[in-house]
Amino acid sequence: MTVVIGFEGSANKIGVGIVRDGEVLSNPRHTYITPPGQGFLPSETARHHRSVILTVLKEALEEAGLKPADVDCVAYTKGPGMGAPLVTVALVARTVAQLWGKPLLGVNHCIGHIEMGRLITQANNPTVLYVSGGNTQVIAYSERRYRIFGETIDIAVGNCLDRFARVIKISNDPSPGYNIEQMAKKGTQYVELPYTVKGMDVSFSGILSYIEETLFSMLVEITERAMAHCSSQEVLIVGGVGCNLRLQEMMGVMCKERGAKLFATDESFCIDNGAMIAQAGWEMFRSGQTTELSDSWITQRSTILCCHPVTRETLLLAGTEQMKWR
């Protein structure tokens, strides 16, 4: 059996997860929380990660009941993400790999979310809605390719919600999006807002002052269009915003009307975590991929999920094959 440990720290969450042949053995995580009205700066986020990462590593090993000798590979988030936090995690992962005498593997953050979602939900061939603080994309696997069918043309949905929360001083504990969701549950009046769907793409910047229900309606619409194009009967929601119950409810209504099935996970696996990096790393390691120490750099803006057709095999080479945003 193959055991992979994964280090994730591309934004304000630092996590270490351990996966063994499709089983999540441990997945502890710490979050850097700032005061209401404030975001998280890269340098301060990196400082937080440095202060707790060894503690999280110890928690992961103890929870899994494993020793360093039991680990076969060390995976880490290579990008995309915030530069300083990514560097912090990469340095620790490199050090751990050398101290333990294990191969190192750089993983694309986006691939980690998708592979974790597929593992936990056992979705077969879903249309994927990837929604987080830095990403908003509708992705489907069609004709041996992962293809982006729609995406935001300005800011990501999670970033839109976070910025709205900062404007009206909503608490960042445990997260702005979660607190907006709880407040929205108490709402009784629907306010009509700008609804900007441009073909298969969406725009959120113009409705930053209005928020949630309309944002999610736009996402459901472009996801349904992608399903129709691919003749898909499954939807998988991944990314930090994906644990929003209202988004899941609205997507579920659409799926029911189409006779399709919705797959989603809770905050344990939707939000950035180490196990998702471990799982993607497990897939890559099993296919013979490793990252040489000289290539174990990080990159803030790279992504494998681009408009150009990319095979799933290439996607799993995310640690060595990097592509830029168009």
Image (spheres, grey):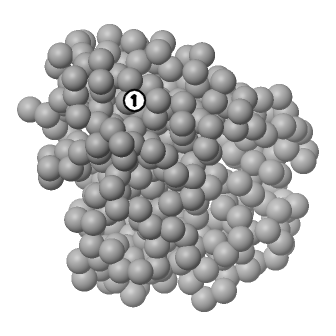
Q: Give the image location of residue 218, x and y in percent.
A: 64, 73
| 80 or 165, nearer to the observer | 80
Residue 98 seen in the figure: yes
Q: What's the residue type where badge 1 is placed?
A: Ala
Image position of 246 with respect to 199: above or below: above
Residue at the farthest front position: 294
Image position of 59 with respect to 207: above or below: above
Residue for point 37% across, 47% down: 295
> Secondary structure under badge 1?
helix
Residue for point 63% across, 30% down: 46
Quadrant that contains the N terminus:
top left
Is the residue marked by circle 1 packed among few (<14), some (14-19), or many (20+) residues within 10 Å?
many
Residue for point 30% across, 26% down: 97
- Which of the 4 image quadrants contains residue 166? top right
Q: Give the image location of residue 226, x and y in percent.
A: 44, 80
Q: Give the image location of residue 188, x and y in percent.
A: 81, 54
- Residue tagged 1: 93
Q: Give the image location of residue 190, x and y in percent.
A: 81, 64
Residue 222 seen in the figure: no
Residue at the farthest left position: 1
| 286 or 123, nearer to the observer | 286
Residue for point 35% across, 22% down: 96
Quadrant that contains the C terminus:
bottom right
Image position of 281 with respect to 202: above or below: above
- Which of the 4 image quadrants contains residue 304? bottom left
